[in-house]
Amino acid sequence: MLAGGILVGAAATPAAAQTDIAFTLDWRFEGPSAGFFLAQDNGYFEEEGLNVTIDTGAGSVEAIPRVATGTYQMGFGDINSLIKFLDQDPGQAVKAVMMVYDVPTFSVVGRKSLGITEDPKSLEGKTLGAPPPDGAFAQWPAFVDIAGIDTSDITIESIGFPVREPMLAQGEVDAVFGFAFSVVLNLKAQGVPEEDIVPILMAENGLDLYGNAILVNTEFAEANPDAVKGFLRALAKGFADAVADPAAGAAAVLTRNDILDLDVEIERLTMANEMNINTPYVQENGFGGIDMERLGRAFEQLTVSMDLSGQVKPEDVVDLQYLPPVEERQFK
């Protein structure tokens, strides 16, 4: 399968001996994707009898219908948007089976020179650029509610991902929604001085949510439980490798997207590891788990801010039966 114009996932053993899994990322191939590619390059998927193809995504919200429809058997998307998706239609065939971003990357990133500070209320009266499929923008109602932001004089301008950072760099908007590790480094690449870049992290301002998780088509999972278990086992190894050696992880990404800068992607992966993946909770409890009590608190926030109907509960959104034992999910 072609992934962003690049063929990945070619089987080294006969296809008949393997289970095919088409996997969609949330975004293009960048540093934080390293865990997926190291699982592939280091043979962990193959060891589990899997032939995995990995495709680029169009945003962490868009991954959800891709998996629910069966176009992809598994994917990487925002669990909060999944909650909303299933709340609107509980019959959709998709669940989260492993957490990757224990702390969400959701942020609004602005520029000090345009009046943005670390205080969320500095967004009042400003123009914010928002890519509609972006996971951070999907949490805007929740963030407004928890941070007490007055939106009456805020202008939300719908923009595409390719122009997000250029528009902020040129001052056409005052701030943009996005994942912190993507927007900050992309702005630096646009020539914006680091001291002028102000990320407002939603998780540091009252939004107690999870971030992106591994999604599975439930019909596929029911028919292929061992394949799903093997995929998650391989992925835990891949992410452990990416945490242990970010340079090797970034290099694996560059073999799929050679227009990237290695040092930038090492920095981006290191940021994601430190902020979102290898968190204190993960260091203590292992990678990939989901605390159902914490998820329940997230439901409470989302019910108020995203107008959930209450048709689904945490156990309707998450299925942890496929996770490997904790000892197989520890980062060294």
Image (cartoon, rainbow, N blue to C red):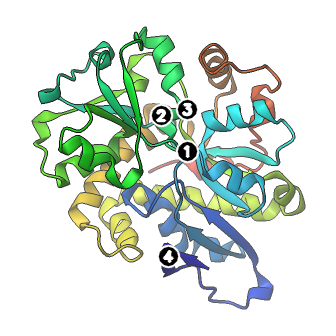
* Disc 4 to disc 2: CB gap under 8 Å: no
Task: State the image coordinates of residue 298 (x, y, percent, origin top left).
Answer: 61, 21
User: Which residue bears the numbered disc 1?
Assistant: 287
Q: Is residue 181 above or below residue 291?
A: below
Q: How far apart are marks 3 and 2 (CA)?
A: 15 Å
Q: What element carries label 4?
A: helix
Q: Which residue is drawn at 12% across and 51% down?
A: 191
Mark in front: 4 vs 2: 2
Q: Give the mark nearest the N terminus, 3 or 2.
A: 2
* Disc 3 to disc 2: CB gap under 8 Å: no
**Of the residues shown, which amino acid type is indicated by label 3?**
Tyr
**Of the residues shown, which amino acid type is indicated by label 4?**
Asp
Q: How far apart are marks 3 and 4 (CA)?
A: 28 Å
Mark in front: 3 vs 1: 3
Q: Distance between the residues labelled 3 and 1?
A: 13 Å
Q: Quadrant of the N terminus?
A: bottom right
Mark in front: 3 vs 2: 2
Q: Is mark 2 on a helix, strand or loop?
A: helix
* Disc 1 to disc 4: CB gap under 8 Å: no
| Residue 207 at least partly seen | no
User: Which residue bears the numbered disc 3?
Assistant: 210
